[in-house]
Structure formats: C-alpha cells, structure tokens
Amino acid sequence: NEGAAAANNVRVMQDVPDGFTFVCADNGGRFEAGSGQIVWYLGSVAAGQTVELAAELTAAKLGAHSHRVTVLGEGGAKA
C-alpha cells in the first residue's frame, strides 16, 4: 500500500487463463470456478505495508498466455 492511509476491504483477483488449471494458493486464496479467478480477501492493508501472494497453476496448453491481477479496496481504490 503506497498510500498514506490503510486500505480496507482489500481483495486480490487473479484470472486463471484458458490453458491452465488451478492447483493451490497461499494466504487463504480460493479458486472460484464461476469467475475463473483466484480470490484473496486481505481485509486491511496498512500504509506502507506489502503483501506477497502466490498461486500454483498447471499449464495444459502451449503458447503465449496473459495473467491479469486486479486489486480492489473500499471506496473504489484499485491497483
């Protein structure tokens, strides 16, 4: 959190692209089959605090793939 105040109700979503299958995620991350995303609910992240998250995926197809991660917080904060 590079801001000057805590970010509340922070959640991180990682898209699992076609051609990959979800294996596991740390820190309570869960795969939501309906959205095809891994979702972490972090709660509050203090100003200056960093959080590292990891997920393991298995590649099922060769080729170029794009991995997108979105971070959302209370009040529309987005990264």
Image: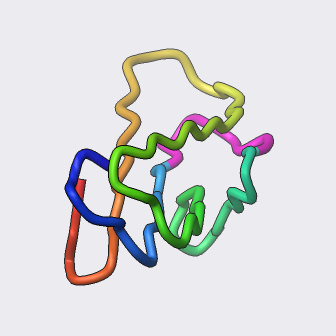
Residue 50 relative to residue 72: left or right: right
Position above or below: 25 against 28: above
Residue 42 relative to residue 63: left or right: right
Kindly identify the residue that appears in the image at 35 percent across and 58 percent down: 71
Q: Position of residue 19 (x, y in %)?
A: 56, 35
Quadrant hosting residue 38: bottom right
| In magenta segment, residue 27 | no
Position above or below: 77 against 65: below
Quadrant hosting residue 54: top right
Q: Nearer the viewer, residue 2 or 14?
A: 2
Kindly identify the residue that appears in the image at 54 percent across and 72 percent down: 43
Residue 64 relative to residue 22: left or right: left
Position above or below: 59 against 54: above
Q: Position of residue 26 (x, y in %)?
A: 74, 45
Q: Nearer the viewer, residue 54 or 34?
A: 54
- Outermost residue toward the right in this view: 23
Q: Position of residue 48 (x, y in %)?
A: 35, 45
Q: Position of residue 27 (x, y in %)?
A: 72, 51
Quadrant hosting residue 64: top left
Q: Nearer the viewer, residue 52 or 60?
A: 52
Q: How is colour applied across the structure in the image?
A: rainbow
Kindly identify the residue that appears in the image at 56 percent across and 37 percent down: 52
For the image, the number of numbered tags is 0
Kindly identify the residue that appears in the image at 44 percent across and 68 percent down: 10
Residue interval drawn in magenta: 16-24
- Outermost residue toward the bottom in this view: 75
